[in-house]
């Protein structure tokens, strides 16, 4: 028996290094977000359903889907709006662990139940897949290998629709996408462009967008980012990303800088340690 437990523990350590150190249930009680994007946690988190109108979770065994109740509700609202706009089911990926905290080696943020990754896959239909099949689907990259533009054989008007719906979902203050995707939006979006302010370029994010929500109302221990700069962001701040590519020995936009060690607030350490 003991040997079985040792083997089981070894398997858990290999397959779920993060979850093995973190509680697998939410901290009970009312929703409470503590800390900042780079060091925080959440109590009272709820889990996104695996299947709901307009959405499916994917890679369920490797991902984590817990968030603040208003964020989980907003994600389902986004899925319904996408469905109403004729888009196929959204593929929902990482949100946060049941009590938040760092997802070591995977994400710098996603610590407080206010971040969610949604695949930029609009080539439908997306029939509801059994959970096991959701493990093996792979995303397309939208960005050319040289990083300077989107791959026009994959890019579709529906990508604009999806990113616009996300950037106009109440509560969302930033939608992070690859600089080449942002540039394509800058070039192609006509008419109402104010939502482009919330679409910000970031490392990677060539296959998915990262949704970042503001601190929900009443969350006094939750530290917000400053709002995005005024304007549509189709400016020098976007050009900077491509200038970095031009520099010799430049960092490409494929990999973010190494994160600093994370020191959680004391209230988070208590939440993590509670049974
Ligand atoms: Zn993300």
Image: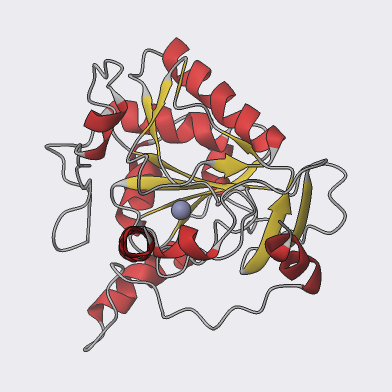
Q: Is residue 127 above or below residue 189?
A: above
Q: Is residue 212 visible?
A: no
On screen, 149 above or below 85? below
Q: Residue 185, position in %: x, y? A: 38, 42
Residue furthest front in the image: 1
Q: Is residue 70 left or right of residue 251?
A: right
Residue 158 % position (x, y): 32, 26
Is residue 75 shown to the viewer in this render? yes
Choose between 28 and 162: the one closer to the eye: 28
Residue 219 position in % (x across, y down): 84, 49
- The structure residue drawn at horizontal position 22% and vertical position 88%, both measured from the top left corner, is 249
Q: Quadrant of the C terminus?
A: bottom right
Q: In the picture provided, is 66 more to the left or to the right than 170?
A: left
Res. 68 image quadrant: top right
Residue drawn at x 48%, y 66% is 237
> Which of 191 and 148 lies nearest the eye of the viewer?
148
User: Residue 172 occupies which quadrant of the picture?
Assistant: top right
Please state the total of marks drawn on the protein image: 0
Query: In which image quadrant can residue 138 be found?
Result: top left
Which quadrant of the figure contains the N terminus?
bottom left
Which is nearer the eye, 93 or 252? 93
Query: In the image, residue 213 lies at what x, y percent?
Result: 64, 46
Coloring applied to the structure: secondary structure
> Who's the residue at 33% across and 32% down the image?
159
């Amino acid at each position: 028996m003991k040997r079985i437990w040792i083997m089981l523990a070894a398997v858990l350590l290999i397959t779920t290094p993060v979850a093995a150190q973190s509680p697998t249930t939410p901290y009970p009680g009312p929703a409470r977000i503590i800390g900042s994007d780079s060091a925080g946690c959440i109590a009272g988190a709820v889990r996104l359903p695996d299947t709901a109108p307009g959405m499916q979770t994917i890679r369920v065994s490797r991902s984590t889907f817990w968030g603040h109740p208003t964020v989980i509700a907003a994600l389902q609202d986004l899925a319904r709006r996408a469905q109403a706009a004729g888009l196929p089911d959204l593929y929902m990926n990482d949100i946060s662990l049941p009590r938040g905290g760092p997802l070591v080696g995977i994400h710098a943020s996603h610590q407080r139940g206010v971040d969610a990754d949604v695949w930029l896959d609009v080539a439908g239909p997306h029939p509801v897949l059994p959970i096991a099949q959701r493990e093996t689907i792979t995303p397309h990259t939208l960005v050319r290998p040289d990083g300077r533009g989107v791959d026009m054989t994959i890019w579709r008007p529906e990508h604009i629709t999806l990113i616009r719906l996300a950037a106009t979902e109440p509560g969302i203050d930033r939608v992070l996408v690859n600089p080449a995707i942002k540039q394509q939006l800058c070039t192609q979006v006509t008419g109402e462009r104010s939502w482009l302010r919330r679409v910000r370029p970031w490392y990677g994010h060539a296959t998915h967008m990262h949704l970042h929500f503001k601190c929900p109302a009443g969350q006094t221990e939750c530290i917000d980012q400053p709002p995005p700069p005024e304007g549509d962001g189709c400016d020098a701040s976007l050009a900077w990303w491509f200038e970095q590519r031009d520099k010799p020995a430049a960092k490409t936009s494929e990999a973010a800088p190494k994160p600093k060690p994370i020191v959680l607030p004391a209230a988070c350490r208590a939440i993590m340690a509670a049974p």
